[in-house]
Amino acid sequence: MSSETFAFLAASVMVAGSCALLFVADSRRAFSGRYMNLWLTASMLVVLCAASYLTEAELDHPSLVVALANGAMVGAVGFVWLGCRSFNQVPFRFGWVGVAVLLIMLLTVLQSSLGSNWSGMFPKMLGLSAFSALTAIESRRGAFGSFRVSWVMTIAHALYASYAGARAAVLGLRGHDDVVFENYFSVEVMTILSLVFALVNTIVLVFVRIEELVARRGNGAPGCYTSLRRLATLHRQLAGSVVLGVEILDFRVIRHAYGVAHAQELVTRLFYCVLECRPDALAIASDRGGVVSVLLAEPHVHDDFFTALRSEYLAQSSGLADGYASTLRITVSTANDEARLRQNGAVPPAAG
């Protein structure tokens, strides 16, 4: 590996790490779902992959480090695919990615006698090509495909899948000493292409995230996600409107026992349950304490809605937390009763 490629690799570790930290900060601050945690995992695997290849070059290519780097590289692309499926609300299983990663790592160690630089190269290329092709297909579907920037993801993954497949074919048919392989599919070319591919993925996911939040917070249209402050302002402006506060009881207990990502997934499912039960909601907001606030135009809320919401939430959340689904507490406030919103920080206290 040349010194220029080595320096580019080190710089990309810092860039990928910075992007991953931005994803972490954003997912803890704003509304997000499981797809965000899957993309966070992909970002962390990119950092692990780049750091492993750096370590490999410094330690004269030990087979275990090469195996870790190859597995992390394939796993990163696999988790991008899982994130896209989760974004489109398509069922998925971690097993496909996990088995592929473990198999590639095992083959890398077993093939170490062929030379550390090339051990596990063929199965790694096949894994990258397969998961990139799946991501290119998934990025054209559902909600993810509705974003304008998703085309960049589709093109990038289609090209990367084609290149990885061609590299595997040339390596299998002609070997790594062939002139064609050395000119177009060498380690240096693949390294630079992979790092550009990783940065393009990060940029696309950041723009998807921004476009998603802008769409939810846009203009307070029916069913639109907004901030608590904006919801409180609309509540004061719309005469006769009411705010439903739907609180997940024991939310802090669940967050402490199962983690922030798990608890946030409960809020995400509650959010979609509210949308399903009340598609006429003027605006919806959530806070960090497991409370989803819903703005409705009508002053009277029927008991049928409460029953339907609790039933839908139980069905959506019972699979989490080892079968335990925290119950809901629903409160109703009018424009003259802003105590709960003020307590949540949505309404600033009156001056003086």
Image: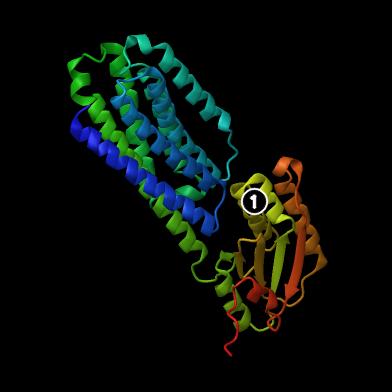
Image quadrant in which you'd find residue 105 = top left
Image spot of residue 338 (x, y percent): 67, 79
Screen quadrant of the C terminus = bottom right
Amino acid type for the residue under numbered disc 1? Ala
Kindly identify which residue carries mark 1. 263
Image spot of residue 168 (x, y percent): 33, 20
Please indicate whether residue 280 sits to the left or right of residue 146 in the image: right
Q: Residue furthest top?
A: 113
Can I make out residue 209 in this image? yes
Which residue is rendered at x = 23% and y = 24% of the image? 186
Q: Is residue 43 above or below residue 253?
A: above
Helix, strand or loop at mark 1 = helix
The answer to which of 133 and 287 lies nearer the viewer is 287
Please indicate whether residue 278 sits to the left or right of residue 128 in the image: right
The answer to which of 131 and 103 lies nearer the viewer is 103
Which residue is rendered at x = 26% and y = 25% of the image? 187
Please indicate whether residue 264 sits to the left or right of residue 249 in the image: left
Which residue is rendered at x = 71% and y = 62% of the image? 247
